[in-house]
Amino acid sequence: MAYRGVYYLGVRLNLWPGPQHYALKQLNLKPTDFNQHISAVALKLQKQGYEAYIVGGSIRDLLLKKGIKPKDFDIVTSALPHQVKQCFARSRIIGKRFRIVHVPAGREIIEVSTFRGTATWMSKFFSARYRNNIYGTLEQDVWRRDFTFNALYYDVKQGQVVDFTGGVSDIKQKKLVVIGDSADRFRDDPVRLLRALRFLAKTHFDIDQQCENQINSQKMLLRSVSKDRLLLEVTKLFNQGHAHASFQALMKYGYLQILFSGYERLAIPMTQHDRYFSSVFRAIDEKYHRNERLSTSFLFAALLWPLFETHRKKLKKITAYSVKKVIHRVLRFESRYVAIPGKLQDAVQDIWLLQHAFETKKSPFSEDRYRQPRFQNAYLLFTIRAKYLEKLAEKAMMWQSEIEQASSRSTTGESDAGK
Ligand code: ATP
Ligand code: MG
């Protein structure tokens, strides 16, 4: 990586002073801003003689939004995975692509990874798994990270943040900056394209023209990424409180069609679904702000609904059998690039079948059905659809009163039982 080479040369020739160190105070942070468990894990590693830093999402999010307790905890250390495991009794080594250690602390799981080194020309003779798990030093680890604001390292013992790549100043200037050459970095790992969209949606930062050009031109590369990784990243786009902005970013750069190729062939212009999608993603963000977890099945059912709906409309005769067949076809087709595991497919199918039931069923559901989370997700999707389809509005009202009655029956039932 040329960028790293220039950095080393700069430091050697005294042209560049090396990393910047910021005391927490300079960044308007205090040690208690960090979750005590994550700090304790880092300190324990330091006490055992290893280097250890809090890195990634937690430090970035603190700098982005002061006063917010981050939910994501990553530590990087000079200790090798088995050495980390020795330090923490209940920890586990996991990961295929990268070996990391999960350390349970309080109610959180803290991800501890070892500094990564860089592959040499010789490593190309070894497997990807070997190349991904070459360990290194802090100075090497920095250049493997994706964006400058994700490469800030907090040293708990010293109480300072180490910044090699100018991440702190990029945050101040509201810029999303790729570490190194964006064309190379996106090519090396196309998941970074999706991560870029996620961080753009989250921060509304600016990106430079070259990076934007890459996001526009390299998107096909995503299709070569493992399906499981894409499932994880797609979910992350929508479960962090900025689902609406993430969806807009996907649309702006044409990524929805890359991930779910049925959208490439949709005869109806996507703009026709604008209001539907806005409503879906606003509902998802509202859930997040009420501290409710997003169900992945609701996400996929809502995200792929217009595709299923298009095919359903083409059916000459709507029967349970024909509808199920269409559901299977759509889900099989849409899991070409993003994994939709069997259980998730079953849940999506249920939510879609319930749409059909809401539209046609005349008698109430059984009492316990109303309380099932899947039923509630299906009902949420139905109410969103009913906002735009007049023919569903009356039905939605009918089900609303039905569901309210059922819930008041069950609360009086419960309080009676408690007497
Ligand atoms: P989140 O808050 O969503 O967890 P994050 O940045 O912490 O965001 P993680 O997937 O937890 O994301 O990764 C932790 C850190 O590992 C990142 O901050 C980044 O430094 C590095 N990282 C993760 N994925 C990549 C990648 N594909 N390429 C380079 N660095 C990565
Ligand atoms: Mg993280």
Image (tube, rainbow, N blue to C red):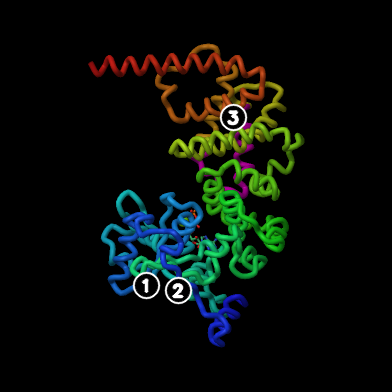
The residue that label 3 is drawn on is: 324
Question: Compared to 335, does 326 lie above or below?
Answer: above
Instruction: Label 2, secondary structure: give it.
Output: helix
Asked if labels 2 and 1 touch by Cβ distance under 8 angstroms, the answer is yes
Amino acid type at mark 2? Leu
Instruction: Label 3, secondary structure: give it.
Output: helix
Q: Is mark 2 within 8 Å of ligand 1?
A: no
> Between disc 3 and disc 1, whose residue precedes?
1
**Residue 351, horizontal then vertical, whole percent:** 53, 30
Quote the CA–CA distance across marks 3 and 2. 53 Å
Task: Categorize mark 2 by other alpha carbons within 10 Å: few (<14), some (14-19), many (20+).
Answer: many
Question: Compared to 121, does 327 lie above or below?
Answer: above
**Residue 100 appears in the figure:** no
Q: Residue at x 57, y 53 (%)?
A: 199
Residue 51 got which mark?
Answer: 1
Residue 292 got which mark?
Answer: none
Task: Reply yes or no: does residue 337 show up in magenta.
Answer: yes
The residue that label 2 is drawn on is: 138
- Most foreground residue, 228 or 20: 20
Q: Residue at x 32, y 56 (%)?
A: 37
